[in-house]
Image: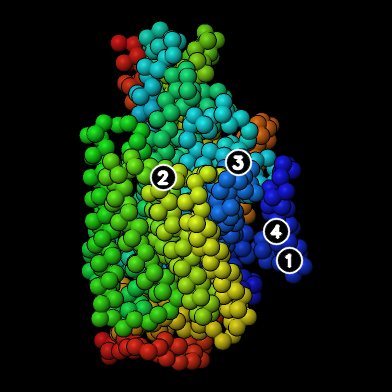
Amino acid sequence: MSAVAANFTETPIPPDEARGYEEKAFGFWVYLMSDAVIFALLFATYVVMVGNTAGGPDGATLFSLTRASGETALLLTSSITFGIATVEAARGRRDMVLIWLLVTAALGLGFLFLEFGEFSSMISEGAGPQRSGFLSSFFTLVGTHGLHVSLGLFWLFVMVGQIVTKGLTAPVASRLMRLGLFWHFLDIIWVAIFSIVYLPGLL
Amino acid sequence: MPFYSAIAASGAAVTVLGGVAVMAVVTWFRFWPSLFGEWLSSLDHKKIGIMYIIVAFIMLARGFVDAAMMRAQQAIAYNSDGYLPPSHFDQIFSSHGTIMIFFMAMPFLTGLFNLIVPQQIGARDVAFPFMNSVSLWLTSAGAGLVLISLVIGVFSTAGWTGYPPYSETQYSPDVGVDYWLWAVLVSGVGSTMGGINFLVTIVKCRAPGMHFLRMPLFTWTALITSILMIFAFPALTVVCSMLALDRTLDFHFFTNGDGGNMMNYINLFWLWGHPEVYILILPAFGVFSEVVAVFSQKRLFAYISLVLATSAIGLLSFCVWLHHFFTMGSSETVNSFFGIMTTIIAVPTGVKVFDWLLTMYRGRLIFKPPMLFTIGFLVTFVIGGLTGVLMAIPPVDYMVHNTTFLIAHFHNMIIPGVLFGFLAGYMYWFPKAFGFKLNEWWGAASFWCWIIGFYLAFMPLYVLGLMGMPRRMEHYDIAAWQPHLIVAAIGAFIIFLGIVCLGVQLAVSIRDRKQLLDLTGDPWNGRTLEWLTSSPAAPYNFAVLPKIEGIDAFWHLKEHGLAYKRPAKYEPIVLPKNSLIGLFIGGAAFAFGFAMVWYIWWLAVLSLAAIAALIVIRASDDEPDFVMPASTVQAIEDERFEQLAKAPRNEMEDEPGFVGFPAPEAAK
């Protein structure tokens, strides 16, 4: 084997690259389906446990429609700005892509800031996840989404770094496309959180 | 440290000394450079597959020691404490189940997928070779956590299912359940990624002409298994994370008070757990389907019905999970629904059994060891299936729930159904992996020990279950049970001989490898595409991608005299470069699991940061591949054709009943 290995030379990759990107996109869709199952089970658990307040506070006393709407507005807008970044990437306008990605990041950070504030105020009121089964499931569901957003932001900054250093090359563009899928997926999950957690909790 | 008993201490010593011995051997023979350079860093699916199977065999030995200890304890524990204290006995049955499911069966099936599926569909590698290596090392990290629990701390006493509230901190305050949780979580992530990898590989990387309905049955079962992994493993991840949150951060998902709901655990666990049964068994069905056709020297009977049955089982496997807890107290309607669904799943399984039987019908059978395992499976599996249908009836289940009848039932499914399948696959595909065949006498001896040992070990448990013996008893005071338990212990000993035979078989075959050489790459007169490649296959599997024109693609090529035609010229081939990053991610995941078990927060943060950094490094590498020049391909292929020319008469020709090779028609 090693004699064979010595003969390997490194030359640029011939063009079945495109197929590779297609496989990656398909694989990422499949991963998102798997992730969707995780959220489905967290939603199911939340719905099962929403009444298990163990004498503690319930959603109506804890949730704030203003804050939830603010979070929703920030996250949905960030999807639009990411969409614009994708369009700019297709046009090959590197600086515009960077600007719109940073706008997206700012909106995502704003979302996390609001969520963090919500969590910490709940915990300081004695309504942390240790209080009841209901709150355990609430923090886990919403927190898992928040964790995904944080990872998405981390990935977004890595992409900004790659675009700055490598430019909009084919591999970078393909990664950016998958980050886009991830980001929009989190939006969809958030819409479900808003409609299953916050709205019924408040109405 | 396990100084609470001499037995635990010696188990720890064996684990540590085993590790040290391996290191010593590697150092003595100066294997370190080739170990890291060619194996641990390899992204070649064939090498990854071999490493998976090595993990599986190591864990099989460990899991079997657990089983033997339990059987020995129960054989002598009538009106006595036996030799194992309860807490130690409980650790043993928990680790036995955990190891056999997660770290023996899962790596074994993933290893076989890796070794064979790309070659069966005419691909050069899996879709994501790097992710494949990460999967391997995450699985190994989980296995490592189970092994190290023997040395540092204790393992779970909550059984392999870890039901709360017993597995909550209140009742299990030590680190045992945490070891179980993090071992399962870390390897579960690896399994999910493995599922994604093989789904994409099978859907996207097939050779030209390899339509879905031309894929070999093993590939079909790999496809359905991958889908099950993708959709079932998230449930395991979710339920284990919730239990970990309960234990680590004092959440209340499954606690007794404060609004916890422990039934939700059982629902979520089996929402993964039942599909998992089929994740284990479908690949074995795939192996049997390959083996039975080749060694009956006939085309597989009713290919389409086997494909449909496999798919139906995949679908139905998500509709039966409640039969694991009929006694939980759901309404009659719910229990009846799941009882009926469970009996329905026997239908596609029955279809398969008939297809295999009809493949053998009027075939010319050749009783090589893989075929012996297949026939042993067919007979034994049907018995286990019948007891399964029995327990699908909720009133019957109420009678035998949590008795040894259940233990007998699922071992009756999993030993012949899963393990025999994997052992058959191991002996069938070994030449493809290493270029020489395994000794057949020792293979057959192993089979006979396994099957006789199986019947002796588990048939008494059916009787004991009907006599009312609960599972997991450390000692008992009913005299009538003891004779059965002694027979079961004898059975376990015979299975031990079967495992010894496997070891001897391997050693003897390595010694005699010159006589057992497989120069053609087609030792069994095979039908499917993996036999077209050389044994062991070149790094790229196929120098030129074959054109597929029917089921049993390789048979077709041989019939038309196209199997060994040399192409006019070779093209350069793109292959993944080796990378140690997968190994490092696995190491960091192991450190993370260990940190979470012992609440070492700085190490947890550090290892997560390391994983993130490694992923970013890998994700910034735009040239993960290299190009093997056509001249190298040519050199490898020249050597291959030289070997082909030298190959002696195929040994299958000496078998009674051999009907000959497909006659080449004149090429058009």
Position of residue A178 measured from the top left corner of the image (x, y, whole percent): 42, 42
Q: Residue at x 48, y 60 (%)?
A: B457
What's the CA distance linking mark 3 and mark 2?
A: 20 Å
Q: Chain of mark 1?
A: B
The reply to whether label 2 and label 4 mark residues of one chain is yes
Compare marks 3 and 4 and give the one earlier in the sequence. Answer: 4
Q: Which mark is residue B18?
A: 4
User: CB atoms at circles 1 and 4 under 8 Å apart?
Assistant: no
The x, y position of residue A158, in whole percent, is: 55, 37
Report x, y in % for residue A48.
35, 24
Q: Residues within 10 Å of mark 1 (few under 14, many from 20)?
A: few
Amino acid under disc 2: Gly
C-alpha distance separating marks 1 and 4: 11 Å
Residues marked 3 and 4 touching at CB (< 8 Å): no
B575 with respect to A65 (left or right): right
Q: Is residue A10 above or below residue B565?
A: above
Residue that badge 1 annotates? B25
Kindly identify the amino acid type of the residue bearing the numbered disc 3. Pro
Q: In this rendering, does residue B389 appear at all?
A: yes
Q: CA distance from mark 3 to mark 4?
A: 27 Å
The residue singled out by tag 2 in the image is B468
Residue B545 seen in the figure: no
